[in-house]
Image (spheres, rainbow, N blue to C red):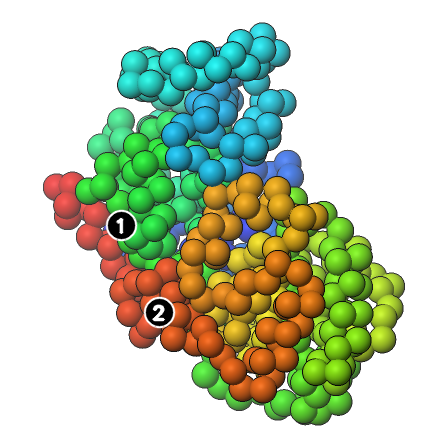
Amino acid sequence: MKILFVVLRPAYIIHIRKIIISLRKKGNTVEVGFLDSHNKTEFDNGPVEYLMSETDGVLIRQIPNREDKWTNVVKAVRSVANYLIYFRDGHKSRSLAVRFHNKLPYFLLQLLQAPFVKKILNSVVGKAVFRYLERVIPEDKTILAWLQKNKPDVVIACPYIFSAVGEIDYVKSAKKLGIPTGAIIPSWDNLTTKGSFHVLPDTTFVWNDKLASEAIKLHDIPKESIYIAGAFKSDYLFAQNGSFDKGLFFDNIGLELNSKYILYLCSSANITSDETEFVKQFATTLANSPLTKQLKLVVRPHPLGTAMWEGFDMENVVVWPLDNVLPDNPSSERDYYYQLKYCEAVVGINTSALLEAAIVDKPCVTILSDKYKYTQFGLGHFHHLLNGGFMEISDDLDKAVAIIANITDGIDSRKVERNKFVKEFIRPHGLNKEVGEITGDYIESMTKSMS
């Protein structure tokens, strides 16, 4: 069987690497086609090199994007639909609609400011209009010809709902040709922070029941077309069963062996902007408490936010690592896992790293802050953290320090809830079931279900 993965950029291979490896082990032909060659970043190389080191025979190349005479019309129509999704009933990230302002023609943006226009376009009739427009917009002839020439048996798109053209048009053209299609929604926040489904794939892959519910309620995805797979990128955290010299690890970080430390996990810049001042306040509060003054604070920067930490200098605070932060190769995966494993607890504002800490069974603490109110309560995905039951939640620094003191004294009051959360949110098929393998098996079955 020949499976084509269509990704926005090579960096997204980090989410599907284990799926590809599983498919290759079973003798399938796998090709990865990426669309965007104009916005390459340092994060595009690591996932590709890691994949190629673990399996052979995977063709990775740039494939045509949509660039026909309909492209501008397609972008406008789909961008309006992406904007409107944020004003549907139950959407908890409404403020993020501003992201689409620069993608809309000025006259359309002005028209859409009227509440009654939003209401009409999000009604049953309005949704039908957008479905009709998508049907009358023709498939891109170049993409159709490319698929006809390369003859994939299945087309899987990822991340699918980020851009107005690209992966969507491969799914649209594949459906026209009768090729089974799927869309992998790679992260837990995508359904409430990105665009929408302009073309429905045959199968939509999500992490869990809660995200399936979002797909149904916010994006009108038919329940029967959703496959609950688990957290695609996190398989490596379950597989770290080897040993790594603890003394060497602490030496790498810059701590004395067996130092007790709290791990602060930074959020992305669009969540917290510059976290250095907040960390200074937190570190000072830790140091001033007689219950926690012996603790070190280790700060792990967000992969896209290392620059703000260069030159940061504060007693009892270590910033590490400043490079090789993204876990997209064996050494960075190992370092991240053991950085989590050896800490006493983790602290974060609103980051996927809190989920990853739960996988490693570490107590998790979040601090509700007026400074970050917009990017905590104002974003739909943060409610998965708040309502997950696995985190200690504090509304100020002093209370957070008191919670940490209890944790270091052996009081882990959220352990049962944390393990339950991991089973339900991260690996719903079972803790011993690799998400990459489960998803690969389902992709293999898609041609049979379509025949």
Q: Picture coordinates of residue 218 (x, y %)? A: 36, 34
What label does residue 420 carry, if any? 2
Picture quadrant of residue 293: bottom right
Residue ID at (40%, 22%): 140
What label does residue 227 carry, if any? 1
Mark 2 neighbour density, 10 Å: few (under 14) some (14–19) many (20 or more): some
Task: Give the structural element (helix, strand or loop) at label 1.
Answer: strand
Work out whether 388 lies above or below 287: above
Q: Nearer the viewer, mark 1 or mark 2?
A: 2
Label 1 amino acid? Answer: Tyr
Work out whether 361 lies above or below 394: below
Residue ID at (34%, 29%): 199
Q: Picture coordinates of residue 66 (x, y %)? A: 48, 25
Q: Is residue 294 left or right of residue 429?
A: right
Task: Give the structural element (helix, strand or loop) at label 2.
Answer: helix
Picture quadrant of residue 425: bottom left
What label does residue 183 carry, if any? none
Label 2 amino acid? Answer: Lys
Query: Toward the viewer: 318 or 202?
Result: 318
What's the CA distance linking mark 1 and mark 2?
21 Å
